[in-house]
Image (tube, grey):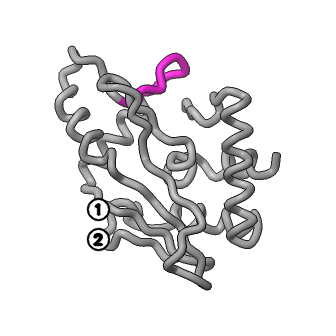
Amino acid sequence: MYHPIKQLSQESREKLEQQINSYAIAMGGKNAFLKLLEAIRNASPHPLVSKKTALEFSGGLMKWNKQIHRNNLSMLSIQMNARTEDNANLMPSRDNKSYKNISNMLRTLSPLSVSVALNSDKTTAIFETKAFKIIDTDTTVMEPLFELLFFAPISVAKKLINN
């Protein structure tokens, strides 16, 4: 399966590695960051579709600003799987039958942002990320950190965090 995180340019990959490592240090180490990822993967249903817009994990609290409906998450997952090495764009071409539905889903989810705070101070976020980077009306890509947190295999995060 194609994972855009693996296909990042060397510069973008190094930047993501630095981000992850600085967040891991702020959380108390690499294992604390990996525990967050495991808590997200083990949550049922997917944390983004839960009624609470928060997920408590052993080291703190993750919050997001928007509740997501299951059908939007399913549509997002389908679009993520449709990406290729040549095209990481989540927005389909205008002649695609589901263009309007996908466009509406991306517009609905575009303000989504996630923040993580520690147990010691749940009011101060140690990091935040948006879900998408909207480049223009026809190009929307997922932020690498958001994808790493919610969708990428933990093995990808381990490789990034250990470099």
Q: Is residue 2 left or right of residue 114?
A: right
Q: In this view, does 24 lie to the left or right of 127?
A: right
> In x, y percent, where is residue 148?
57, 48
> In x, y percent, where is residue 11?
71, 31
Residue interval drawn in magenta = 82-90
* Residue found 29% across the figure and 57% down from its top: 68
> In x, y percent, where is residue 145?
56, 48
Q: As drawn, which residue projects farthest toward the bottom? A: 120
The disc labelled 2 sits on which kind of residue? Lys
Q: Is label 2 in a helix, a strand or a loop?
A: loop
17 within the magenta span = no
Q: Is residue 135 above or below residue 38?
A: above
Q: As drawn, which residue projects farthest toward the right? A: 163
Pointer 2: residues within 10 angstroms few (<14), some, or many (20+)?
few
* Residue found 65% across the figure and 33% down from its top: 6
> In x, y percent, where is residue 48?
37, 60
Q: Is label 1 in a helix, a strand or a loop?
A: loop
| Quadrant holding the C terminus | top right
Q: In which quarter of the image is residue 7?
A: top right
Tell me which secondary structure the magenta stretch mostly adopts.
Answer: loop
* Residue found 24% across the figure and 49% down from its top: 71
Front residue of 36/107: it is 107
Pointer 1: residues within 10 angstroms few (<14), some, or many (20+)?
some
88 within the magenta span = yes
Contact between marks 2 and 1 (CB within 8 A): the answer is yes
Front residue of 37/118: it is 118
Q: Which mark is residue 67?
A: 1
CA–CA distance between discs 2 and 1? Answer: 7 Å
Q: Earlier in the sequence, mark 2 or mark 1?
A: 2
Q: Which mark is residue 51?
A: 2
The disc labelled 1 sits on which kind of residue? Gln
